[in-house]
Amino acid sequence: MSLSELVERSGVPASTIHHYRRAGMIPPPVREAANRFAYDSRHLDALLEIRAHANEPACRDRIVDAAIKAFRARSYNEVTVSDIAEAAHIAKGSMYRYFESKEDLLTAAIERLLDQTAARFEATVESLGGAEGLTSDPAKSALVFGHLLADVLPILLELGARAAKGHEPSADLARKVLRTLAETGGRPFAVEGDPDSAINAGLGVIERAFATVLSWAIGPDWPPDNEQLAVNNDA
């Protein structure tokens, strides 16, 4: 590959590549002509490895972000570790420094989405006016929460399918997801001394949200977009 292709695939600037080459950190390129050099997978892997070591927390976050994007678009069986490594600009071998398997990648992706969605649920409850707002306008609440669930639905369905097939780690994670979202959505309805009150109320919120998502899914407007949501919220 050319230097420009190596830059694009590795995400490392040309000036930095030249520095690494002079420092002996990557193999020398093959001279094809007076002013033209060729690079191959050895150079790409070396650059990705250097990047991984340079900023490990950021590298792990980048891998999880790439995994989320991949699992949102395709099923578990269709996604490969190589796909995620390429999208995260990291050598495939380096992936296993952070995750033992594709199963671990899926779990990390779902846990990241759960944290993000729970935070969005909490902010949404507040924006709707807490318990009073959720009760006074259940249709609007279902619409807003439905939009949040639609964003993570592909991965949640994948998790549910794996749990239904008897995969116990997926079943445990699915229970954690449902409980976390139910507690977040139902927290405004919590009754002191009744630990189940928030969960029961939250399950009702989630049930109405899923009904909204299903109505979108069988209609002409799937997937819903932010513009549609804004119109319906203003109505």
Image: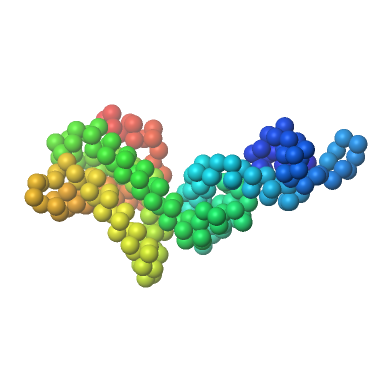
Instruction: Quarter of the image for the N terminus: give it.
Output: top right
Residue at the front extreme, as displayed? 23
Q: Residue at x 19, y 44 (%)?
A: 187
- Residue 173 as seen in the image, left or right of residue 1: left
User: Residue 226, position in %: x, y?
Assistant: 39, 35
* Nearer to us in this view, 74 or 211: 74
User: Residue 131, position in %: x, y?
Assistant: 15, 39
* Nearer to us in this view, 60 or 164: 60
Q: Residue at x 14, y 36 (%)?
A: 132
- Residue 199 as seen in the image, left or right of residue 105: left
Task: Tell me if I can see residue 138 in this picture.
Answer: yes
- Residue 148 as seen in the image, left or right of residue 80: left
Q: Residue at x 23, y 34 (%)?
A: 126
User: Residue 116, position in %: x, y?
Assistant: 36, 43
User: Residue 98, position in %: x, y?
Assistant: 52, 53
Rendered image coloring scheme: rainbow
Task: Tell me if I can see residue 204 in this picture.
Answer: no
Q: In this view, does 200 lie above or below 35?
A: below
Instruction: Quarter of the image for the C terminus: give it.
Output: top left
Q: Is residue 132 above or below residue 46?
A: above
Q: In this view, does 168 lie above or below 87?
A: below
